[in-house]
Amino acid sequence: MFEEKTYTERRQELKNYLKKGFYLFLGNKESPMNYPSNTYKFRQDSNFLYYFGIDEPDLAAIIDIDNDDEIIFGDDRTIDDIIWMGTQASLKEKAEECGVKKTAGFALLTGFVNKAAASGRRINYLPQYRAENSLLLQTLLKDSSAGQCSQDFIKAVIRQRSIKSPEEIEQIENALEISYEMNTAAMKLTKPGMHESAISGIIEGISLAKGNGVSFPVIFTVRGETLHNHYHGNIMKEGDLALLDSGAESDLHYASDITRTFPVNGKFSEKQKEIYNIVLKSQVNAISICKPGRKFKEIHLETAKIIASGLKDAGIMKGSTDDAVMAGAHALFFPHGLGHMLGLDVHDMEGLGENLVGYSEEVSRSDQFGLAYLRLAKELHTGFVTTIEPGIYFIPALIEKWKADNKHTNFINYNALERYMDFGGIRIEDNILITETGSRVLGRKPIPKTIEEVELCCR
Ligand code: GLY
Ligand code: MN
Ligand code: MN
């Protein structure tokens, strides 16, 4: 945990902002894999971690601003629990570590909520993403219509969690230190003839050996054109590109999220180099133009233009680059968004609502193919941490569909694409902090990124 004052100050800031009301926080429970007592690795809810820091299952908390009350609900381990799971600090001791003075048994939560509801008060809660907690909420609120998934509450949390403090940045950089190990190990160990799983297993092992495990399931594949490809069963061949999109969690559960693409045999072909350098140029440029006050959507579109212009030089696209990007033709090759917020969640706060996190009154979500997947579009502020992750992909099914539909024939050379149907995909992803004057790539050790650096590491 951070020091007690971090949590006390976070809750105080929330209370100052919201001014009044009754707020309910549900921590996570253990989640069974295949029978009740065989559970997945426990992951606490990130909002609960942010305001209370206690990394244990079966907790809930309330902040009652009107009565100046904060209570954590949970149960101490019984002697039976201790036999199987060991001793643990008491709930009272854990609550003290985050500056909360009152605790109560979990069973008392229902009565507490009912009493507040019966006196005409609104029970504000955040969106739920686990069935157990949705059911618990239904049980807690069954006799009243007083519960509300409150927009003001959600916005207050997003406003606060979006700006990272120095101690949060340090945590993200700790996660990135693990990412450095994961990525350089993958580059060094990957060889033709190996299964992808031989490498993805080692990468995941590094994240566990040095921290809390991965921040999302490892993407390691020679079929990088499938954006979130979690299949690890291919045998890697001479001439293939391997795409590794992975992240680790720091000890306090802050995430890293890095993508590197490298040749399985350690040497890029000329054809691979040409496409790689377009992605790299667009990524480095995007990082250099991020600064407070700029809308991330503009940076996404400028990146798309660099990609379209590079693909034009390669003979794959044609016509006016500006017009191609405005029409969305580049999205055949770059169908996803440039990046997303990063923090306690790898797609930070996405559970609170992607549009509330990434969009604003000034920027609303486009429905154009490709641009519609942009998770972050709004104006950047000092203290935001985002990913920058452009890519170029040759997705055979999508190319064939667009070709059959005669889509954007004025911008795409479909004949030239025949040479690229088995190319795969390239993505390069870093994590940046928006500073007062621009941005800084996070991580204490740069992860190999240029062709020369990657080939050197592969050797
Ligand atoms: N980890 C998936 C992504 O890069 O957003
Ligand atoms: Mn990623
Ligand atoms: Mn990402």
Image (spheres, grey):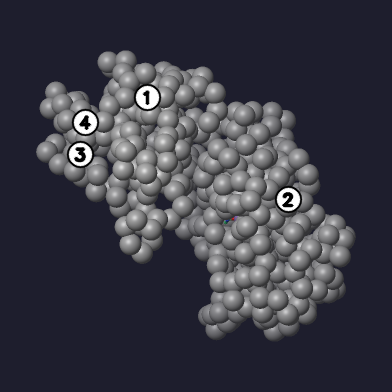
Instruction: Give the residue displayed 70% in from the left and 55% down from the top.
Output: 182
Q: Which residue is mark 2?
A: 180
Residue 223 x/y as whole percent: 63, 74
Q: Secondary structure at mark 3?
A: helix
| Earlier residue among tags 2 and 3 | 3
Q: Secondary structure at mark 4?
A: helix
Q: Which residue is mark 4?
A: 108
Towards the viewer: 3 or 84: 84
Q: CA distance from mark 4 to mark 3?
A: 11 Å
> In the picture, which quadrant includes the C terminus?
bottom right
Towards the viewer: 194 or 87: 87
Residue type pointed to by label 4: Leu
Which quarter of the picture shows residue 441?
top right
Residue 445 at least partly seen: yes
Name above or below for residue 346 compared with residue 145: below
| Earlier residue among tags 1 and 3 | 1
Residue type pointed to by label 2: Tyr
Q: CA distance from mark 1 to mark 2?
A: 39 Å
Towards the viewer: 451 or 397: 451
Q: Which residue is mark 1?
A: 92
Residue 45 x/y as whole percent: 42, 42
State yes or no: discs 2 and 3 in contact (Cβ < 8 Å).
Answer: no
Which quarter of the picture shows residue 420?
bottom right
Residue type pointed to by label 1: Lys
Residue 257 at least partly seen: no
Q: CA distance from mark 2 to mark 3?
A: 45 Å
Using residue 120 as the reference point, say whether residue 266 is left or right of it.
right
Residue 305 x/y as whole percent: 70, 57
